[in-house]
Amino acid sequence: MFQVPDGDLLLFYKIGPSPSTWKGWMKSSSDNGKTWSAAKALPEGFIGPVKNKPVLLSNGVLLSGSSTEGNGWRVHFESSSDLGNTWTMIGPINDGKTTNAIQPSILIHKNGKLQILARSKDRAIMQAWSSDLGKTWSALTPTTLPNNNSGTDAVTLKDGRQLLVYNHVLPPDSVKNGKGARTPLNLAYSSDGINWYAAAILEDSPISQYSYPSIIQSKDGMVHIVYTWRRKKIKYVKVDPKKLIGKKIIDGKWPAMKGYTAPKSVEIED
């Protein structure tokens, strides 16, 4: 979803039996989601934002982070200068062979640069940067944060920090496709997108899984997070970002915290 400032609420969604055959669609609502317009298909070849929300840039462009899985995991972008009426494709920015990434979140830095954080098969959250409002992008490179081949999401806060929700799990390098336990579920923030600070542990039970998080900040400054809870329910968490006190993450390791011991048992799926 995306809320146009002083405008419609936009809903992007997919129809299809698998990610490789998805077709992108959208609807709009002028009454905060109570009623919706007729479905509108995105142009051929466009699928809309994949998993994570689009962002509205300073030049009025709505930029969606998107990805495909049919020919390797590849990240691309879909931009609209008229809030969803017409679209332009950017990328893909990787070949899906040397690097594999999907489901990017778009962050906006104070210096005008854009950054994406994306899920990968390479045991690390991947990143890329743009200095021209998303028209061109750097190569994908690993961040210092681990990834367990599970979805993440991030948001640029009003105070300029970047807030990330993810599983801080480094899977063994012997595991195929970098898959790891989807627990715990963590919250970290950064002022520059490079140095990250451990802020909170939302879930830490060995019972899996806590996954597919989504995060936004509302007008009152509060942060709202939803995620899949053990594949059975959707859980909602509200966080006051002003109260987050971080401890620097060094060498990709979640820091020890006084009075807290992480669970030692292995992931339990049932």
Image: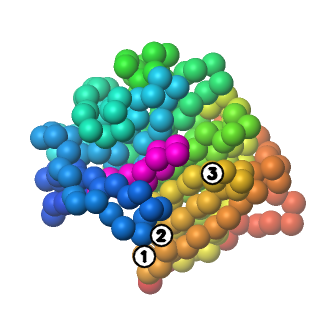
Q: Nearer the viewer, mark 2 or mark 3?
A: 3
From the viewer's perspective, tell me whether residue 56 is left or right of residue 217.
left
Residue 28 in the image, given as x and y percentages of width and height = 34, 55
Instruction: Please say if the residues under marks 1 and 2 sit with CB atoms less than 8 Å apart.
Output: yes
Compute the Cα span from label 1 to label 3.
25 Å
Q: Amino acid at mark 1?
A: Arg
Disc assigned to residue 89: none
In the image, what residue occupies the spot 62% across and 60% down?
224
In the image, what residue occupies the spot 22% across and 60% down?
38
In this view, 13 is above or below 127 = below
Among numbered discs 2 and 3, the one appearing first in the sequence: 3
Disc assigned to residue 228: 2
Instruction: Please say if the residues under marks 2 and 3 sit with CB atoms less than 8 Å apart.
Output: no
Instruction: Please say if the residues under marks 1 and 3 sit with CB atoms less than 8 Å apart.
Output: no
Residue 121 in the image, given as x and y percentages of width and height = 37, 45
The verdict on residue 11 being magenta is: yes
Compute the Cα span from label 1 to label 2.
6 Å
